Image: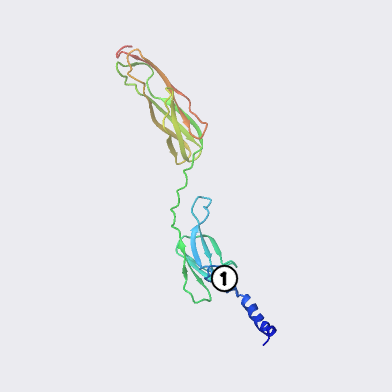
Amino acid sequence: MNRQQRRALFAPCMVSALVLTPATAATAAGSGVPARAPAAACALVKGEPAADGKATFDLKLSGFQGGARVTITGPGLKTDARVASNGRYVDENVKHGDYTVKERNRNTPALRCTKVPAEADKPPAPKTADVTGATATQTTKTGKVPCIIFSPELPVKFVGTITAATAGDVKYRWTLSNGKVSGVLTLNFAQPGTKDVPVHEWTPTGLVKTGDQLSGWGQISIIGDETKSNRAEFSMTCVTPGQP
C-alpha cells in the first residue's frame, strides 16, 4: 500500500474522531461528567400580600420536562396542568397546605412539594373615628378655698366630652397651662355619638399655703386631627379655714 492509499484510509477516521456527539461534547467541555437535567422540584412559597394585608401563597414547579402534563393535588384541589417549555409552572394565590405533583404518563412516584410555614393573619388596624367636637370642664370649686398646708380642692380635676360622627378609636391628650402634657389616651366609639372623657388632674408644684393664688387651664387635643376643646379655666385663692 503506497502513501496516498494510506492517507485515503486514515482521513475518514480523522473526520469521525472530530465529530463528537452532544453528550461527548458536553463531557469534553465540562469537568468530564456528563451534564444532567435539573431535578423536578415543587415548592409552596409566599406570594404578594393581599390588599387587606393577609398572606398569600404560590405553588411553583421547576425542572420538569418541557410541555409535560402533570396532576397537582392539594387542599380542596386536584387539577391537570401543562408545564411551560422551560419546565416551569406557577399557580398563584393557592391555599396553604400539603401539595403533591404527579407527572402523567410516567411511572414515577408523586413529588411532595416543600412549603413555607403558614402565617397568622394580622388583625386589621383599628379604625379611627371622625371627631366633630370636644369640650373640657373643670369640676373644682373656684374663688376662695380653704387651705393651710393643702386644700381639699386640690388637685384640680378636669373632665370632658368627645363627639364622633363614626365608630372607631379616638386618640387624644390633655395639655395643661403648667406645660405638662399627658400621654396618648384612647376613647373607643362603638357607634357615633358623644362619650365622657375620664378625669384628668392638675397638681400644683410644691406646698400650697394661705394666701397662694392658683390659676390655670386644661385642654383636650385630638391626635391626628386639628380638633381642640375649649380651655377649661380655674382660679382660686387659698384662705384660712373658716375665713369668709
Does any portion of residue 183 appear in the rendered image?
Answer: yes
Which three-letter amino acid code belongs to the residue tagged 1? Ala
Relative to 177, is 48 on the left or the right? right
Relative to 145, is 51 on the left or the right? right
| Quadrant in the picture for the C terminus | top left
Q: Nearer the viewer, residue 142 or 38?
A: 38
Question: Residue 47, how many percent across, how many down?
Answer: 52, 56
Q: Is residue 15 above or below residue 227?
A: below
Q: Which color scheme does this rendered protein use? A: rainbow
Question: Residue 138, how many percent across, how many down?
Answer: 41, 24
Q: Nearer the viewer, residue 104 or 183?
A: 104
**Residue appearing at x 52%, y 62% in the figure:** 60
State which quadrant residue 145 falls in: top left
State which quadrant residue 236 falls in: top left
Pointer 1 residue: 28
Q: Is residue 107 above or below residue 170?
A: below
Question: Residue 211, how many percent across, how many down?
Answer: 35, 12
Question: Residue 10, how many percent across, how many down?
Answer: 65, 81
Does any portion of residue 235 appear in the rendered image?
Answer: no
Secondary structure beneath label 1: helix
